[in-house]
């Protein structure tokens, strides 16, 4: 496995007409971390994620991956794995073709044969535990299955960073819980720097190493779940995390001491299709 | 699967989803409405069409055949097929480019561009033809320049092609814009983050998604291109055997009081239209089947309940 990439954003500014979506945002995400960008809708969290991917162009500021300047690099050359909120699977391609797409379009550059691509796609399919579904079309899959195909497709190009936009937003409660614990384990295994956007504080607290709380285009607080939970930096963070009214919220926090054991426990966990 | 079986299936699915059967009107209302519709179509569409074929055969099959195989008629057929093929090809390229630009990018004056695309539909074809005369005619803007360089546009096939392409331009863009808007650009963005170039994205992602809509648009465009009369009439010059398309040849024959010949050639045009229509029906059947499967499967909430 290659070493994970760190992400550095400096003074990122983004405006849509008169609306300031991001106001001087500076953020560092350490290599190998699972970071959650948490905030209400309209706080600029998805815009920030899309700027990291290069799908949106910032009006000011700079962006580095591991010290390498990416500010003006096209999304095509950034090597990010992006999982869209509604998955954006290629609807006319089979599951296997979807997963192999990134390898297929860069086949010459990577020097891969058709068989290599097939084998790698099949291995990824097995990694996301969808063996046997390679010839299905996206429309023949459940929401949770589509989500994992989208993940496998993003991972196929061996991205430097993995970005997920509201990864569990379109799923029902049960599948959502299963999948997010699975993503946590998955992240431990892959070790790839991962950033996901969410408006669900429970989701962020449960699986992230680092939480970035956003409010009206600014970052209010960055910290480990315990830090953010125990010492909310602003009134907004306190309110948004629902800390005062919700004593039960504390129970979702992973206890830092029990971490290794807990992981082992989670490891035996089977993800339902 | 037969059409009836498909309908039953979707009715059943609807019933399961909403827990009730869709209410039916009494028999006499249904029968009455159907009768009115059939009568209307018979008088306005079917009857004239039958009359065209009847008039074509009024002087016997041999006369009809000789009118169609007349050298001037054959030249008109050749010109019409060439013009419709060329204008459909041009509209394919520029219509797709316009729809792609409008739906996948943000830029100023997008509304203006959409209005311009609609312009040929709102302008009378005769006016469309006159535009080209004003531009390329002997007294037109480029007329003197064209004359000194010995380039013939007006009263020659280039003008016929220009006029036909202009009149039929909206078909492709108009069909594709709503389709591409509904599909959004997430799939394209996904392809780009996966390392695809612009062309690869179009070829592997956008094109397969619009393939059927595009084919449908081209069929409609072709039907209109073959039958276009007004704009072509203004710019063609009506040179028999050279710049007469089928509709113009029909008009010429009719004006010479050879109505059986005129209707013979007209029935040929009608046959082309039938062929086009047949293709359209096949296409629609395919499209509706596709739409149905997608409608039922993209419904996430419905799925997750399973």
Image (cartoon, helix red, strand yellow):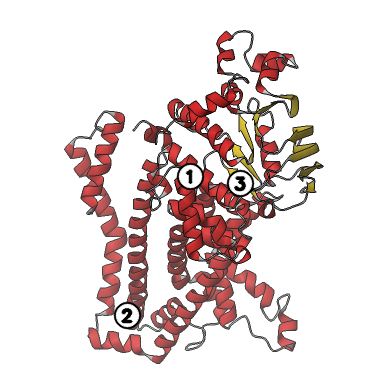
User: Depth check: B170 or A89 in front?
Assistant: A89
Q: Which residue is mark 3?
A: A81
Q: Secondary structure at mark 1?
A: helix
The Cα atoms of the two marked residues, 1 and 3, are separated by: 16 Å
Does residue A195 appear in the picture of this structure? Answer: yes
Q: Mark 2: few, some, or many residues within 10 Å (few <14, many ≥20)?
A: many
Label 2 and label 1 in one chain: no
Quarter of the picture containing the N terminus of chain B is bottom left
Q: Secondary structure at mark 3?
A: strand
Q: Residue furthest left?
A: B27
Q: Quadrant of residue A34?
A: top right
Give the left or right position of residue B24, taking residue A191 as reference: left
Q: Which residue is mark 1?
A: A127
Label 2 and label 3 in one chain: no
Q: Which residue is mark 2?
A: B264
Give the left or right position of residue B32, taking residue A169 as reference: left
The answer to whether marks 1 and 3 mark residues whose Cβ atoms lie closer than 8 Å is no
User: What residue lies at 47% left-to-right and 59% top-to-bottom?
Assistant: A118
User: What residue lies at 66% left-to-right and 22% top-to-bottom?
Assistant: A225
User: Depth check: B224 or B89 in front?
Assistant: B89
User: Which tag, 1 or 3, sits closer to the chain's start?
Assistant: 3
User: What residue lies at 28% left-to-right and 38% top-to-bottom?
Assistant: B13
The location of residue B102, given as percent across then percent down, is 62, 53
């Amino acid at each position: 496995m290659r070493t994970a990439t760190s992400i550095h954003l400096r003074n990122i500014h983004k405006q849509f007409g008169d609306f300031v979506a991001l106001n001087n945002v500076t953020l560092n995400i350490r290599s190998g971390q699972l970071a959650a960008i948490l905030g209400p809708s309209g706080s600029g969290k998805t815009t920030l994620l899309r700027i990291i991917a290069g799908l949106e162009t910032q009006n000011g500021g700079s962006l580095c991956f591991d010290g390498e300047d990416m500010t003006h690099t096209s999304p095509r050359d950034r090597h990010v794995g992006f999982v869209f909120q509604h998955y954006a699977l290629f609807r006319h391609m089979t599951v296997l073709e979807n997963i192999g797409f990134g390898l297929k379009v860069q086949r010459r550059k990577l020097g891969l044969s058709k068989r290599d691509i097939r084998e790698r796609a099949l291995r990824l399919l097995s990694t996301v535990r969808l063996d046997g579904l390679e010839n299905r079309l996206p429309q023949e899959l459940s929401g949770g299955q589509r989500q994992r195909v989208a993940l496998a497709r993003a991972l196929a190009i061996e991205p430097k960073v993995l970005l997920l936009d509201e990864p569990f937003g379109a799923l029902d409660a049960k599948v959502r819980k299963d999948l997010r614990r699975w993503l946590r384990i998955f992240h431990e295994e892959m070790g790839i720097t991962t950033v996901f956007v969410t408006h669900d504080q429970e989701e962020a607290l449960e699986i992230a190493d680092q939480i970035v709380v956003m409010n009206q285009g600014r970052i209010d607080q960055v910290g480990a779940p315990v830090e953010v939970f125990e010492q909310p930096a602003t009134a907004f963070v306190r309110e948004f995390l629902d800390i005062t009214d919700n004593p039960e919220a504390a129970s979702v926090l992973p206890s830092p001491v029990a971490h290794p054991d807990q992981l082992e426990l989670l490891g035996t966990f089977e993800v339902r299709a | 699967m037969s059409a009836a079986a498909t309908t039953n299936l979707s009715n059943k699915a609807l019933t399961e989803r909403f827990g009730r059967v869709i209410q039916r009107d009494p028999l006499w209302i249904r029968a009455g409405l159907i009768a009115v519709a059939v009568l209307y179509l018979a008088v306005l569409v079917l009857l004239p069409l039958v009359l065209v074929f009847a008039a074509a055969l009024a002087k016997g099959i041999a006369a009809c055949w000789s009118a169609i195989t007349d050298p001037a008629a054959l030249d008109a057929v050749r010109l019409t097929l060439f013009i419709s093929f060329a204008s459909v090809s041009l509209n394919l390229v520029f219509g797709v480019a316009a729809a792609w630009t409008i739906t996948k990018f943000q830029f100023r004056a997008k509304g203006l561009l959409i209005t311009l695309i609609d312009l040929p539909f709102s302008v009378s074809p005769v006016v469309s033809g006159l535009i080209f005369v004003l531009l390329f005619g002997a007294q037109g803007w480029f007329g003197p320049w064209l004359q000194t360089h010995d380039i013939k546009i007006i009263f020659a096939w280039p003008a016929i092609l220009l006029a036909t392409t202009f009149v039929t331009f909206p078909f492709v863009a108009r069909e594709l814009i709503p389709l591409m808007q509904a599909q959004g650009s997430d799939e394209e963005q996904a392809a780009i983050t996966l390392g695809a170039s612009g062309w690869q994205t179009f070829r592997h992602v956008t094109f397969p998604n619009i393939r059927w809509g595009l084919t449908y648009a081209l069929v409609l465009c072709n039907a209109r291109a073959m039958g276009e009369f007004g704009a072509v009439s203004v710019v063609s010059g009506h040179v028999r055997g050279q710049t007469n398309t089928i509709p113009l040849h029909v008009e010429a024959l009719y004006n010479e009081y050879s109505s059986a010949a005129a209707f013979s050639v007209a029935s040929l045009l009608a046959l082309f239209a039938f062929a086009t229509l047949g293709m359209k029906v096949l296409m629609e059947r395919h499209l509706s089947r596709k739409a149905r499967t997608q409608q039922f499967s993209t419904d996430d909430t419905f799925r997750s309940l399973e």
